Amino acid sequence: MKYITHSLVILLSFLIWAGTAHAVEKTSGQSRLPVTESMVNQKFIFIGNLIKRSKTFKNIEAHGDEDVFEDIANVKALYKKAELSVQQGDYEVANNLLNEIVKLVTSITRKESKVTNDQTNSLRYYNERKATIIALMKTFDEITTNEQTANESLEPRRRMVDDFLNQAKSNITNGEVDGAIVNVDKAYDVAIRITIEVRDGITLIRELNFETAKDEYLYEIDRNDSHYFLLDITVKEKKPSAKMLLSIQKLREESDGMRADADNEAKSGNYEAATDILNKSTKNLIRAIRMGGNFIPG
Amino acid sequence: MKSGYWLFILTICLSGSGIAASFAQEYDILHPPLGTEGIYDPENPGIEYLQQPSEALSLLPSSPTGNYVDWVKAMDDSLIEPRASIYGDQIMRAISMDVIMQQTGSMPYVRFPHYDHSLILSCTNCHTAIFLPKKDANPVNMYTILKGEFCGVCHGKVSFPLTDCFRCHSSVRDKRVLDE
């Protein structure tokens, strides 16, 4: 008994030690990669590609101004120094030089691309925001007119949206993109606030009403198509057994046949009959989807 | 002597659970370690310096699909607080407006919660490029979604997958209940 207890104590002590060691190893973590020969060599090749072969760097060389040319010369000089350090086996120095190159190339790239990117992004941002505001306000106007929810506090702010938008448009005409962004943002902010005021806490219901038998048939076609899609996804994701796959395939073929029958009925103008057949086809697909391992009601 | 023995056993159990937790983290099935998931290069020496998905994701509320995290609940529980902008100088204006879609065939109705979406997206992200903010202006159905339009622009790609049916088809079919 005594030996068993001692053995247990030794075993459990080891477990404590192992647990603690593992935890320390997990949490201590170094802040940066250790500098090794293979790592520096790999980095040297990558950065060589960046400054000799990359499209970005070639573009910079082709379009850069005088400041940029000076930076490019610095990059190349640093790379030569790094090459020398690698040859001499001084990997720590080489690594630092390569890091310097990355920083420099990043700053050149930003400097070069800032102007064009900023303008393109700002214009895109302006156009998207403007489209959102116009659409939201169109709906807002319909809501306030139809539901008579307009009030004294909303109307001046509704006008503010148009004022800010008009200012933004004149900014654009005068080439003041930054000013346009400020104004379109102001318009957006007010538009969102008043939209929230008339719509917050509301539940909208999209009802299912078909005006004609053809409309219902077209709806059933979409529903049938989406179940085919869903079946494909289910089979791909759930990976049913080979035996189950055979049954699924059989149901699918039956559905295909019914779909063809429905199409023929629709061509003859018998949309009601076509809808009934499509319903049966979809039900078959639902069974197949369930067999595949995805439960859906129906 | 006896109380010392039980104290010792308790220490062992705590240590053992620590080891089990480390093991679970290392071999997390839901959040596989970097390099085993087919995205990161396991040969890259830098991989061990990156945070393991299990370390961050296993602390968040779980979901049965996707990356197994319920991100909306994580926000509701204040476990994550997404920034409104890079510099944190903007605020999100969330709107609480549900849209119930009844064209769902045999499935429960779809409840689209504007609130959950507007907590992390600007109106411009969806309106007007994806959805027109107008009643019956968006012919949404599973076919178009599965093709990657409407909800399918994000869901199935960066948001929860389309096979998690009842996350969207979450509304009972009885309209009387909806009206209450």
Image (spheres, rainbow, N blue to C red):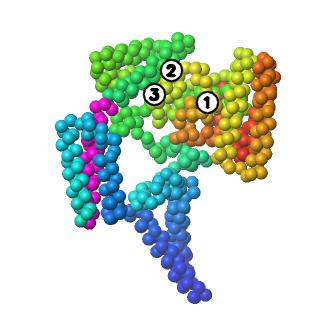
Mark 3 Cα shell of 10 Å, populated few (<14), some (14-19), many (≥20): some
Circle 3 marks a residue in which chain? B
Q: Mark 1 lies on which chain?
A: B
> Is label 2 in contact with label 1 (beta carbons under 8 Å)?
no
Q: Which percent across, then down, holds residue B178?
A: 66, 28
Amino acid bearing label 3: Thr
User: Front-most of B166 and B125?
Assistant: B125
Q: Which chain carries label 2?
A: A
| Segment tinted magenta in the rendering | A89-118
- Nearer mark to the viewer, of 1 and 3: 1
Which label number is shown at residue A59? none
- Judged by depth in the image, the label closer to the viewer, 3 or 2, is 3
- Assign the magenta stretch its main secondary structure: helix
What crowding class fits label 2: few (fewer than 14 Cα within 10 Å), some (14-19), or many (20 or more)? some
Q: Mark 2: which secondary structure?
A: helix
> Which label lies toward us, 2 or 1?
1
Instruction: Return the x and y of residue A34 as percentages of the image width and height.
Output: 33, 63
Q: Where is residue B162 in the image (x, y as percent from the top left)?
A: 61, 39
Q: Which residue is drawn at 73% across and 16% down?
A: A212
Q: Of residues A289 and A102, which is closer to you in this image? A: A102
* Label 1 – label 3 distance at C-alpha: 21 Å
Q: Do labels 3 and 2 share a chain?
A: no
Q: Which residue is drawn at 65% across and 42% down?
A: A233
Say which residue label 3 marks.
B124
The numbered mark at residue B144 is 1
Marks 1 and 3: same chain?
Answer: yes
Establish if B155 lies above or below B4.
above
Instruction: Pick whichever, A127 or A208, lies toward us.
Output: A127
